[in-house]
Image (cartoon, helix red, strand yellow):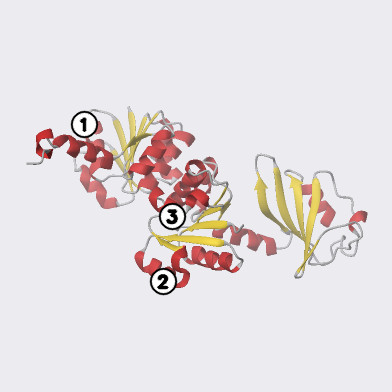
Amino acid sequence: MRLFVLIVGGGKIGTNLARSMIGDGYEVALVESERHKYEDLDREFGYAAIFGDGTETRVLEKAGITRSDYVIAVTGDDEDNIIISQLARDKYAVHNVIARVNDPRNQSTFDMLGIKPTVSNVSTIHSLVEHHLPHHHLLSLLDFEEENVEMVELAIAEGSKVVGRKIKELQFPPGLLLVLIFREHEVVVPSGDIELRADDNLIIIREKGSESPLSALME
Amino acid sequence: MNILIIGCGRVGSGLALRYAAEGHTVNVIDELEETSENLGLGFKGRFLKGVGLDIEILKRAGIEDCDICLVATDGDNTNLVVAQIAREQFKVPCVVVRVFDPNRADFYAGRGFDVICPVKLTVEAMHEAICEGDLEVS
């Protein structure tokens, strides 16, 4: 069965997301409240484009929220994204809700109201910049707050002591699990005999607070 | 009482003037400076320019020790988020929020918020105003 993704907000993010999800075979509905933007979307997406205020239950129902697998709130207003997320999760029992945070100062309000996961362009770019600075090879991908576990991406630097070594030779401290290796355009499933290379990106699940063993490992 | 009002339009300013005249401590927040004119020159409370989602401005307006928070900007979603910040984060004992859309008003009333929906009130009032006799087909 095709998954149905309901996107609220037909700006640059919403529109491009709709395009790529449709390209991947998802069923998509895209809600936009401004008439002139909607008309463009209607030309491109046809019946998948829906005109209306996506914070109104009538509009959400017309867009098919009751059968949606994902609701993605990406309007330019944080208060709208919060309300859309709450309606989706609590009124329509949608299991997967993703919300965009426009102003990082509002992140704490999303967190306080338990709206997650959230996506913020500003925070993403911020962490990308950090990611490319020396000594910041670690990027947090996913935070399981309640479980106190997070998924991180770790880039193996040129000259790191782990380059050329097999995974089974590395002493992974407890609380760390190597899940995947992104190598150029390949995804490598880790096993003991695989040698790590420079520029490998390791996807690691770890208990929070175990930062130092990880960096010690990769020096 | 310490009263915080978000939104200084007709409703917000009306409430502010009334509570200030009754001798309460009143802080009003609105993103538009010119809405302070709605309060007139004799207003005894304080006006702050800013948006209600801004935690810093809420703190400066005394949300941490306010008794009553009245939320009446022209945006339903802004009102609903500010009301939740007031109740969940700052534990304001009494929060009243205006929501025009009856569906959203019902949903958040069901979550325990004190919601005033002008649309529903007007429908009720106008329905009441029509005398039974006026409906009879002549």
Mark seen at residue B29: none
Distance CA(mark 1)–CA(mark 3): 36 Å
Distance CA(mark 1)–CA(mark 2): 52 Å
| Residue B3: quarter of image | top left
The quadrant the N terminus of chain A occupies is bottom right
Answer left or right for A116 relative to B80: right
Name the element at disc 2: helix
Name the element at disc 3: loop
Is residue B44 visible from the viewing direction of this image? no
Q: Residue A128, percent across and down?
A: 64, 62
Q: Marks 1 and 3: same chain?
A: no
Q: Residues within 10 Å of mark 3 (few under 14, many from 20)?
A: some
Residue that numbered label 2 is attached to: A40
The quadrant the C terminus of chain A occupies is bottom right
Point out the frontmost of discs 1 and 2.
2
Residue at 42% across, 69% down: A42
Answer left or right for B76 relative to B14: right
Is residue B134 visible from the viewing direction of this image? yes
Distance CA(mark 3)–CA(mark 2): 21 Å
Q: Residue A11, percent across and down?
A: 46, 64
Q: Number of callouts in the render?
A: 3
Chain under label 3? Answer: A
